Amino acid sequence: MAAKRLLTLWVILCTLLEAKATSLVATQNPEDTVSVVLKQNDEFYEHNGRICKKCPAGHSVFQHCKSSGTEGVCHPCENNTFSKYLNDFERCLPCTECRPLDEVVLQPCTTTSDAQCACKSGTFCSPSLPCETCHKCTTRCPDGETMVQPCTPESDMLCVKALGPADVTSQTPAAGSNGQILFLLGILFCVTLVVAVSVGICKCRIKDSRTGSVTSVWDSKTIRRLRRKCTHGPQEVEDLWDVQVDQRIRLSSLEYANSNARGSETTPLQTTGSSEEVQVSTEQRRNLVPANGKDQMTALRLAFDIFIKEVPLRDWKRFMRALGLLDNDIDTIALMHVGDMKEQHFQMLRTWHDMNGKGASLDSLLEVLCNMDLKGIEDKIRAALITQGLYVLEE
């Protein structure tokens, strides 16, 4: 009898648990699951908590979607406007108008591409600079120079100094070949000597008993004096050697100091940078990945604000050109958001993102900054991304 009661209670308990599970599944919002998947797709964008499908090229968003995973109402571009990529613009971009006085139309504007303009024949304008007006081409080279490239719509005529008979003779292998060979051998000997002296500096150190600092027996000036006695080369070559020698000595001093620090914990280390700073610099070079499980697209868009804040205004257009945006794209976005510089820069980054789709990444932005010789800005952005919790160092 007791066993029968226990069995009845067990059946009732299982029934209640099954009903509770069914209720939870029924009340779960299916859009939450859909949103997680769609956020990782470049064909969708977020609007008021919903994930909408972007409009195709040649269209703009007339009305945003009413439920996640669907497309809103898209209207085709009209009245001399266009859109080149999948987008969530609420209006198409205005077409570029070629200047009738000094430009010709290479390609007319369509709903999916902007107009392409070029300077008229006999004029040019460099694409790396804002083209306010086309400049007249040079018609002939100065006396003593010869043309190596004619004028094009993007560059002026290029002239170089003409080689005379004496110049041609001086460049032949037979003229003074023995002297040139001896000169090259002398340079090779001096390079070998400098490398040998640099290696010796790494091993020859004097330790100051009062401060505990480490200094080299020979400094870079000694090496420069040895090198100048050997080469007597041009000033530009001497300056390059000076930089290389300084770099070798700084690197050697740092390696020696770090080895001493590992061997004796009581010896104070006096160098231009601590070992902890070197480790931090090495850590910062590791790849960054989104923090807290963020998807790549969301983390990258959140990082746009940091790039907008840290990249200097004077370098912004050059940054955009290096990312692949045309001057027409940059100018059009600026006209659409006159007076709001931050919004202009955000829309430029978003246009770059739409152009590249899944190929757009944080590493691409940071690499472009390095290639532009903005290494200090790239380091500040890396630190800000980590500090604000958007990215973490990859394990």
Image (spheres, rainbow, N blue to C red):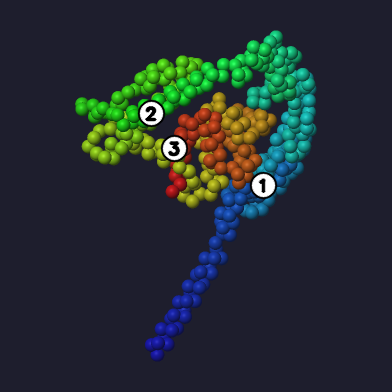
Determine the image quadrant of residue 164: top right
**Judging from the image, what secondary structure is the residue with disc 1 in?**
loop
Q: Which mark is residue 196?
A: 2
Q: Where does the image place residue 90, in percent across and percent down from the top left?
A: 67, 40
Determine the image quadrant of residue 141: top right
Identify the residue at image location x=21%, y=27%. 209
Disc 2 crowd rating (10 Å Cα; few below 14, some 14-19, many 20+) is: few
Which of discs 3 and 2 lies nearer the camera? The answer is 2
The residue pinned by badge 1 equals 54
Does residue 197 lie above or below 144 as drawn?
Answer: below
In terms of sequence position, does the residue under pointer 3 or pointer 2 come before the other?
2
Q: Where does the image place residue 232, in percent across and percent down from the top left?
A: 46, 15
Q: Amino acid at mark 2?
A: Ala
Identify the residue at image location x=46%, y=18%. 231
Which of discs 1 and 2 lies nearer the camera? The answer is 2
The residue pinned by badge 3 equals 383
Front position in the image: 332 or 74: 332
Q: Where does the image place residue 222, in percent across and percent down from the top left?
A: 36, 20
Q: Residue furthest top?
A: 143
Q: Amino acid at mark 3?
A: Ala
